[in-house]
Image (spheres, rainbow, N blue to C red):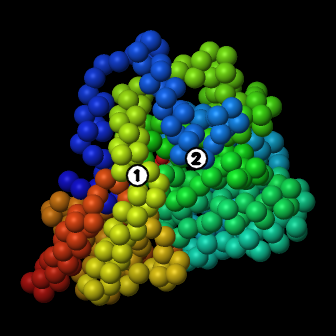
Amino acid sequence: MILLTPGPVQTSPEVPAAAACDIAPWDREFSPEYAGIRDAVREIAGGKPGEHATLPLQGCGHFMVEAAVRTFVEPGAKILVPNNGQYAERIARLAEECGRMPVVLPVPDTRGVTAEEVAAALAGDPAITHVGLVHSETGSGIVNDPAVVGAAVRAAGRRMILDSVSAFGALPLDIAAMPECDAVLFTSNKCLEGLPGIGFAVCPVERTRARRGQAGSWCFDLGDVLWHGENKGWGSFRFTPPVQALRAFGVAVEAYRREGGQAARLARYQENMRILRDGAVALGLRPYLDTAHQGPIILTLHEPDLAGWSLQGFTDALKRRGFLISNFHTTPTPSIRIAAIGANTPEVMHRAVSAMGEALQELREVRAAA
Ligand SMILES: *Cc1c(COP(=O)(O)O)cnc(C)c1O
Protein backbone atom coordinates (compact mmCIF):
# COMPACT_ATOMS: atom_id res chain seq x y z
CA MET A 1 0.00 0.00 0.00
CA ILE A 2 1.23 3.50 -0.84
CA LEU A 3 0.23 6.22 1.61
CA LEU A 4 -0.86 9.51 0.04
CA THR A 5 -1.74 10.88 3.47
CA PRO A 6 -0.06 13.75 5.33
CA GLY A 7 0.83 11.63 8.34
CA PRO A 8 1.65 8.97 8.77
CA VAL A 9 3.53 9.30 5.49
CA GLN A 10 5.01 6.69 3.21
CA THR A 11 8.50 5.73 4.40
CA SER A 12 11.45 4.08 2.62
CA PRO A 13 11.77 0.38 3.55
CA GLU A 14 15.07 1.02 5.36
CA VAL A 15 13.27 3.25 7.89
CA PRO A 16 10.81 0.77 9.47
CA ALA A 17 13.47 -1.95 9.07
CA ALA A 18 15.74 0.01 11.44
CA ALA A 19 13.04 -0.19 14.12
CA ALA A 20 13.01 -4.00 14.15
CA CYS A 21 15.34 -4.35 17.14
CA ASP A 22 15.43 -4.33 20.92
CA ILE A 23 17.49 -1.48 22.32
CA ALA A 24 17.55 0.54 25.54
CA PRO A 25 17.48 4.33 25.42
CA TRP A 26 19.98 4.79 28.29
CA ASP A 27 22.47 2.31 26.84
CA ARG A 28 25.90 3.87 26.22
CA GLU A 29 25.67 2.91 22.55
CA PHE A 30 22.36 4.63 21.99
CA SER A 31 22.95 7.90 23.88
CA PRO A 32 25.34 9.38 21.29
CA GLU A 33 22.92 8.33 18.54
CA TYR A 34 20.15 10.33 20.19
CA ALA A 35 22.42 13.33 20.85
CA GLY A 36 23.44 13.23 17.17
CA ILE A 37 19.79 13.26 16.09
CA ARG A 38 19.22 16.38 18.21
CA ASP A 39 22.15 18.12 16.53
CA ALA A 40 21.02 17.10 13.04
CA VAL A 41 17.50 18.38 13.61
CA ARG A 42 18.73 21.70 15.04
CA GLU A 43 20.82 22.14 11.90
CA ILE A 44 17.84 21.53 9.63
CA ALA A 45 16.00 24.28 11.53
CA GLY A 46 18.90 26.67 10.95
CA GLY A 47 19.63 26.75 14.68
CA LYS A 48 23.07 27.59 16.06
CA PRO A 49 24.94 25.32 18.51
CA GLY A 50 24.68 26.74 22.01
CA GLU A 51 21.96 29.23 20.97
CA HIS A 52 19.23 26.82 19.93
CA ALA A 53 18.36 23.40 21.29
CA THR A 54 16.30 20.47 20.03
CA LEU A 55 13.73 19.55 22.67
CA PRO A 56 11.99 16.26 21.87
CA LEU A 57 8.93 14.78 23.51
CA GLN A 58 7.44 11.34 23.15
CA GLY A 59 4.25 11.65 21.12
CA CYS A 60 2.61 13.57 18.31
CA GLY A 61 2.52 17.07 16.89
CA HIS A 62 -0.36 18.28 19.05
CA PHE A 63 1.68 17.42 22.13
CA MET A 64 4.40 19.76 20.86
CA VAL A 65 1.95 22.58 20.23
CA GLU A 66 0.55 22.16 23.74
CA ALA A 67 4.05 22.01 25.23
CA ALA A 68 5.14 25.20 23.43
CA VAL A 69 1.98 27.08 24.42
CA ARG A 70 2.31 25.97 28.05
CA THR A 71 6.01 26.71 28.21
CA PHE A 72 6.11 30.13 26.53
CA VAL A 73 2.67 31.73 26.95
CA GLU A 74 1.84 32.86 30.49
CA PRO A 75 -1.38 31.45 32.01
CA GLY A 76 -4.16 33.88 31.12
CA ALA A 77 -2.07 35.62 28.42
CA LYS A 78 -3.31 36.11 24.88
CA ILE A 79 -2.10 34.29 21.79
CA LEU A 80 -3.17 35.48 18.33
CA VAL A 81 -4.04 32.64 15.96
CA PRO A 82 -4.44 33.50 12.28
CA ASN A 83 -7.16 31.00 11.44
CA ASN A 84 -6.94 29.74 7.90
CA GLY A 85 -7.65 26.11 8.54
CA GLN A 86 -8.27 23.18 10.84
CA TYR A 87 -4.79 23.06 12.32
CA ALA A 88 -4.96 26.73 13.32
CA GLU A 89 -8.28 25.97 15.02
CA ARG A 90 -6.50 23.27 16.95
CA ILE A 91 -3.87 25.74 18.24
CA ALA A 92 -6.72 27.91 19.52
CA ARG A 93 -8.40 24.97 21.22
CA LEU A 94 -5.17 23.71 22.79
CA ALA A 95 -4.40 27.22 24.09
CA GLU A 96 -7.87 27.61 25.55
CA GLU A 97 -7.77 24.23 27.28
CA CYS A 98 -4.38 25.15 28.80
CA GLY A 99 -5.88 28.29 30.33
CA ARG A 100 -4.32 30.68 27.81
CA MET A 101 -6.50 33.08 25.82
CA PRO A 102 -6.65 32.51 22.06
CA VAL A 103 -7.53 35.54 19.93
CA VAL A 104 -8.66 34.20 16.58
CA LEU A 105 -7.90 36.22 13.44
CA PRO A 106 -10.23 34.94 10.71
CA VAL A 107 -8.51 34.40 7.35
CA PRO A 108 -9.92 32.48 4.36
CA ASP A 109 -8.46 28.95 4.14
CA THR A 110 -7.67 29.62 0.49
CA ARG A 111 -4.64 31.87 1.05
CA GLY A 112 -1.86 32.65 3.52
CA VAL A 113 -2.26 35.37 6.15
CA THR A 114 -0.55 38.66 5.29
CA ALA A 115 1.92 40.62 7.41
CA GLU A 116 -0.52 43.57 7.35
CA GLU A 117 -3.35 41.49 8.82
CA VAL A 118 -1.14 40.24 11.64
CA ALA A 119 0.32 43.71 12.29
CA ALA A 120 -3.17 45.24 12.50
CA ALA A 121 -4.40 42.56 14.91
CA LEU A 122 -1.36 43.02 17.15
CA ALA A 123 -1.65 46.80 17.08
CA GLY A 124 -5.31 46.47 18.08
CA ASP A 125 -4.61 44.42 21.21
CA PRO A 126 -1.45 45.17 23.20
CA ALA A 127 -2.29 42.31 25.60
CA ILE A 128 -1.41 39.73 22.94
CA THR A 129 2.04 38.32 23.78
CA HIS A 130 2.31 35.59 21.14
CA VAL A 131 1.29 34.61 17.62
CA GLY A 132 0.62 30.93 16.97
CA LEU A 133 1.16 30.35 13.26
CA VAL A 134 0.63 27.22 11.17
CA HIS A 135 3.37 27.03 8.54
CA SER A 136 1.73 24.63 6.07
CA GLU A 137 -2.02 24.36 6.74
CA THR A 138 -2.64 20.65 6.33
CA GLY A 139 -6.40 21.23 6.18
CA SER A 140 -6.51 23.06 2.85
CA GLY A 141 -2.92 23.06 1.56
CA ILE A 142 -2.10 26.77 1.79
CA VAL A 143 1.19 28.02 3.20
CA ASN A 144 1.72 30.86 5.69
CA ASP A 145 5.15 32.48 5.30
CA PRO A 146 6.87 32.49 8.71
CA ALA A 147 9.56 34.95 7.57
CA VAL A 148 6.95 37.50 6.44
CA VAL A 149 4.64 37.05 9.42
CA GLY A 150 7.62 36.82 11.78
CA ALA A 151 8.85 40.25 10.66
CA ALA A 152 5.48 41.75 11.64
CA VAL A 153 5.57 39.93 14.99
CA ARG A 154 9.11 41.18 15.62
CA ALA A 155 8.23 44.75 14.67
CA ALA A 156 5.36 44.64 17.18
CA GLY A 157 7.67 43.31 19.92
CA ARG A 158 5.74 40.04 20.30
CA ARG A 159 6.80 36.39 20.12
CA MET A 160 5.95 33.57 17.71
CA ILE A 161 5.24 29.86 18.06
CA LEU A 162 5.43 28.12 14.69
CA ASP A 163 3.55 24.89 14.00
CA SER A 164 5.74 23.65 11.18
CA VAL A 165 4.58 20.05 11.55
CA SER A 166 3.63 19.46 7.91
CA ALA A 167 6.32 21.78 6.48
CA PHE A 168 9.52 21.16 8.39
CA GLY A 169 12.31 19.76 6.27
CA ALA A 170 10.62 20.70 2.99
CA LEU A 171 9.86 24.42 3.21
CA PRO A 172 12.79 26.74 3.90
CA LEU A 173 13.22 27.81 7.52
CA ASP A 174 16.00 29.62 9.36
CA ILE A 175 15.31 30.02 13.06
CA ALA A 176 18.60 31.91 13.52
CA ALA A 177 17.11 34.71 11.39
CA MET A 178 13.90 34.71 13.47
CA PRO A 179 14.74 36.12 16.91
CA GLU A 180 10.98 36.52 17.58
CA CYS A 181 10.52 32.76 17.44
CA ASP A 182 10.11 30.89 20.74
CA ALA A 183 9.55 27.50 19.14
CA VAL A 184 9.49 25.70 15.81
CA LEU A 185 7.47 22.49 16.11
CA PHE A 186 7.47 19.31 14.02
CA THR A 187 7.52 15.52 14.26
CA SER A 188 9.55 12.51 13.18
CA ASN A 189 6.86 11.78 10.61
CA LYS A 190 5.68 14.02 7.73
CA CYS A 191 8.38 15.68 5.59
CA LEU A 192 11.32 14.05 7.37
CA GLU A 193 9.75 10.70 6.43
CA GLY A 194 10.37 8.83 9.68
CA LEU A 195 7.95 6.74 11.74
CA PRO A 196 5.44 8.52 13.97
CA GLY A 197 6.22 8.65 17.69
CA ILE A 198 8.44 11.63 18.47
CA GLY A 199 7.73 15.34 18.44
CA PHE A 200 10.37 18.06 18.31
CA ALA A 201 10.66 21.69 19.30
CA VAL A 202 13.67 23.75 18.30
CA CYS A 203 13.89 26.69 20.71
CA PRO A 204 16.24 29.49 21.73
CA VAL A 205 18.21 28.24 24.74
CA GLU A 206 18.18 31.34 26.92
CA ARG A 207 14.48 32.03 26.55
CA THR A 208 13.63 28.41 27.26
CA ARG A 209 15.88 28.19 30.28
CA ALA A 210 14.03 31.11 31.86
CA ARG A 211 10.67 29.37 31.34
CA ARG A 212 11.37 26.18 33.31
CA GLY A 213 8.68 25.27 35.83
CA GLN A 214 5.95 27.52 34.42
CA ALA A 215 4.10 25.15 32.10
CA GLY A 216 1.70 23.83 34.73
CA SER A 217 2.79 20.38 33.59
CA TRP A 218 5.99 18.42 34.14
CA CYS A 219 5.46 16.30 31.01
CA PHE A 220 4.93 19.31 28.72
CA ASP A 221 7.57 21.63 30.18
CA LEU A 222 10.09 22.33 27.42
CA GLY A 223 12.19 24.26 29.96
CA ASP A 224 12.52 21.02 31.90
CA VAL A 225 13.44 19.08 28.75
CA LEU A 226 16.20 21.65 28.17
CA TRP A 227 17.34 21.49 31.80
CA HIS A 228 17.59 17.72 31.59
CA GLY A 229 19.69 17.91 28.40
CA GLU A 230 22.03 20.52 29.87
CA ASN A 231 22.44 18.75 33.19
CA LYS A 232 22.13 15.05 32.41
CA GLY A 233 23.48 14.99 28.86
CA TRP A 234 21.95 15.49 25.42
CA GLY A 235 21.74 11.75 24.94
CA SER A 236 19.50 11.23 27.99
CA PHE A 237 15.74 11.15 28.52
CA ARG A 238 13.38 12.10 31.31
CA PHE A 239 10.89 9.34 30.46
CA THR A 240 10.93 6.22 28.26
CA PRO A 241 10.99 7.27 24.60
CA PRO A 242 9.86 5.28 21.54
CA VAL A 243 13.48 4.30 21.14
CA GLN A 244 12.98 2.13 18.04
CA ALA A 245 11.21 4.98 16.27
CA LEU A 246 14.10 7.24 17.21
CA ARG A 247 16.63 4.89 15.68
CA ALA A 248 14.48 4.69 12.54
CA PHE A 249 14.30 8.49 12.53
CA GLY A 250 18.09 8.64 12.51
CA VAL A 251 18.03 6.52 9.34
CA ALA A 252 15.39 8.82 7.81
CA VAL A 253 17.52 11.90 8.58
CA GLU A 254 20.49 10.21 6.95
CA ALA A 255 18.38 9.58 3.83
CA TYR A 256 17.30 13.24 3.93
CA ARG A 257 20.95 14.31 3.83
CA ARG A 258 21.74 11.88 1.01
CA GLU A 259 18.83 13.19 -1.03
CA GLY A 260 20.24 16.71 -0.77
CA GLY A 261 18.42 18.18 2.23
CA GLN A 262 15.66 20.76 2.17
CA ALA A 263 16.08 22.02 -1.41
CA ALA A 264 16.03 18.52 -2.90
CA ARG A 265 13.09 17.39 -0.80
CA LEU A 266 11.09 20.48 -1.71
CA ALA A 267 11.89 19.98 -5.41
CA ARG A 268 10.62 16.39 -5.29
CA TYR A 269 7.43 17.39 -3.47
CA GLN A 270 6.84 20.27 -5.91
CA GLU A 271 7.15 17.88 -8.83
CA ASN A 272 4.85 15.40 -7.06
CA MET A 273 2.34 18.21 -6.53
CA ARG A 274 2.53 19.36 -10.16
CA ILE A 275 1.80 15.83 -11.40
CA LEU A 276 -1.06 15.32 -8.92
CA ARG A 277 -2.67 18.69 -9.59
CA ASP A 278 -2.34 18.60 -13.38
CA GLY A 279 -3.49 14.98 -13.37
CA ALA A 280 -6.54 15.73 -11.22
CA VAL A 281 -7.51 18.67 -13.43
CA ALA A 282 -7.19 16.47 -16.52
CA LEU A 283 -9.59 14.02 -14.83
CA GLY A 284 -12.11 16.84 -14.47
CA LEU A 285 -11.54 17.46 -10.76
CA ARG A 286 -11.46 21.06 -9.53
CA PRO A 287 -8.70 22.16 -7.11
CA TYR A 288 -9.84 23.84 -3.89
CA LEU A 289 -7.01 26.41 -4.12
CA ASP A 290 -5.94 28.78 -6.90
CA THR A 291 -2.56 27.90 -8.38
CA ALA A 292 -1.03 31.00 -6.76
CA HIS A 293 -1.92 29.75 -3.27
CA GLN A 294 -1.25 26.05 -3.79
CA GLY A 295 1.45 24.83 -1.37
CA PRO A 296 3.65 21.82 -2.22
CA ILE A 297 2.43 19.57 0.62
CA ILE A 298 -1.34 19.03 0.36
CA LEU A 299 -3.67 18.98 -2.64
CA THR A 300 -7.35 19.49 -1.89
CA LEU A 301 -9.93 18.96 -4.61
CA HIS A 302 -13.63 19.80 -4.60
CA GLU A 303 -15.66 16.62 -4.55
CA PRO A 304 -16.94 15.91 -8.06
CA ASP A 305 -20.55 16.39 -8.99
CA LEU A 306 -20.93 12.72 -9.77
CA ALA A 307 -24.00 10.59 -9.19
CA GLY A 308 -23.11 7.89 -6.68
CA TRP A 309 -20.13 9.84 -5.29
CA SER A 310 -18.99 9.19 -1.76
CA LEU A 311 -15.55 9.94 -0.35
CA GLN A 312 -15.47 6.53 1.34
CA GLY A 313 -16.40 4.84 -1.95
CA PHE A 314 -13.63 6.69 -3.76
CA THR A 315 -11.16 5.92 -0.96
CA ASP A 316 -12.06 2.22 -1.13
CA ALA A 317 -11.74 2.15 -4.93
CA LEU A 318 -8.31 3.80 -4.70
CA LYS A 319 -7.26 1.42 -1.95
CA ARG A 320 -8.08 -1.56 -4.16
CA ARG A 321 -5.53 -0.05 -6.56
CA GLY A 322 -2.85 0.28 -3.88
CA PHE A 323 -3.22 3.90 -2.75
CA LEU A 324 -4.51 5.19 0.58
CA ILE A 325 -5.91 8.72 1.04
CA SER A 326 -7.73 10.36 3.98
CA ASN A 327 -11.40 9.38 4.24
CA PHE A 328 -12.51 12.54 6.08
CA HIS A 329 -12.96 16.20 5.24
CA THR A 330 -10.61 18.97 6.43
CA THR A 331 -12.18 21.95 4.62
CA PRO A 332 -15.53 23.67 5.31
CA THR A 333 -16.95 22.42 2.01
CA PRO A 334 -16.25 18.73 1.35
CA SER A 335 -13.01 18.03 -0.46
CA ILE A 336 -10.67 15.19 -1.33
CA ARG A 337 -7.24 15.51 0.28
CA ILE A 338 -4.11 14.02 -1.23
CA ALA A 339 -0.56 14.48 0.07
CA ALA A 340 2.43 15.06 -2.19
CA ILE A 341 4.82 14.22 0.69
CA GLY A 342 6.39 11.01 1.97
CA ALA A 343 8.93 8.73 0.31
CA ASN A 344 7.06 8.80 -3.00
CA THR A 345 8.60 9.62 -6.36
CA PRO A 346 7.03 11.47 -9.31
CA GLU A 347 6.66 8.08 -10.99
CA VAL A 348 4.45 6.96 -8.08
CA MET A 349 2.38 10.13 -8.53
CA HIS A 350 1.74 9.30 -12.20
CA ARG A 351 0.47 5.88 -11.11
CA ALA A 352 -1.66 7.52 -8.41
CA VAL A 353 -3.31 9.77 -11.00
CA SER A 354 -4.08 6.73 -13.20
CA ALA A 355 -5.57 4.98 -10.18
CA MET A 356 -7.72 8.04 -9.43
CA GLY A 357 -9.04 7.98 -13.00
CA GLU A 358 -9.89 4.28 -12.71
CA ALA A 359 -11.53 4.80 -9.31
CA LEU A 360 -13.75 7.58 -10.70
CA GLN A 361 -14.67 5.38 -13.67
CA GLU A 362 -15.53 2.53 -11.29
CA LEU A 363 -17.87 4.80 -9.30
CA ARG A 364 -19.58 5.86 -12.55
CA GLU A 365 -20.02 2.27 -13.69
CA VAL A 366 -21.36 1.09 -10.34
CA ARG A 367 -23.88 3.90 -10.47
CA ALA A 368 -24.84 3.13 -14.09
CA ALA A 369 -25.41 -0.54 -13.22
CA ALA A 370 -27.57 0.35 -10.17
C1 LIG B 1 0.04 16.67 11.44
C2 LIG B 1 -0.02 18.03 11.97
C3 LIG B 1 -0.03 18.29 13.35
C4 LIG B 1 0.06 17.23 14.40
O1 LIG B 1 -0.71 16.15 14.23
P1 LIG B 1 -0.54 14.91 15.21
O2 LIG B 1 -1.62 13.99 14.76
O3 LIG B 1 -0.75 15.39 16.60
O4 LIG B 1 0.84 14.40 15.02
C5 LIG B 1 -0.04 19.59 13.77
N1 LIG B 1 -0.07 20.60 12.90
C6 LIG B 1 -0.05 20.39 11.57
C7 LIG B 1 -0.06 21.57 10.66
C8 LIG B 1 -0.03 19.10 11.07
O5 LIG B 1 -0.01 18.88 9.75
The answer to whether residue 123 is left or right of residue 231 is: right
259 w.r.t. 361: above or below: above
Q: Quadrant of residue 230?
A: top right
Q: Marks 2 and 1, how far apart in space?
A: 15 Å
Q: Disc 2 designates what residue?
A: 45
The answer to whether residue 222 is left or right of residue 195 is: right
At x 41%, y 41%, the residue is 253
Marks 2 & 1, CB-CB < 8 Å contact:
no
At x 30%, y 47%, the residue is 11
Q: In which quadrant will I find the C terminus?
A: bottom left
At x 67%, y 16%, the residue is 231
Q: Is residue 3 among what the camera can see? A: yes
Residue 308: give x, y in percent of width and height.
24, 81
In the picture as drawn, the residue positioned furthest to the right comes out as 126
17 w.r.t. 25: above or below: below
Q: How many marks?
A: 2
Residue 125: give x, y in percent of width and height.
88, 63
Q: Is ligand 1 closer than 8 angstroms to the Cβ of mark 1?
A: no
At x 83%, y 48%, the residue is 77
Q: Is ligand 1 closer than 8 angstroms to the Cβ of mark 2?
A: no
What amino acid type is highlighted by mark number 1? Gly
Residue 289: give x, y in percent of width and height.
48, 79
In the picture as drawn, the residue positioned furthest to the top comes out as 28
In the picture as drawn, the residue positioned furthest to the left comes out as 369
Q: Secondary structure at mark 2?
A: loop
182 w.r.t. 81: above or below: above
Q: Disc 1 designates what residue?
A: 260
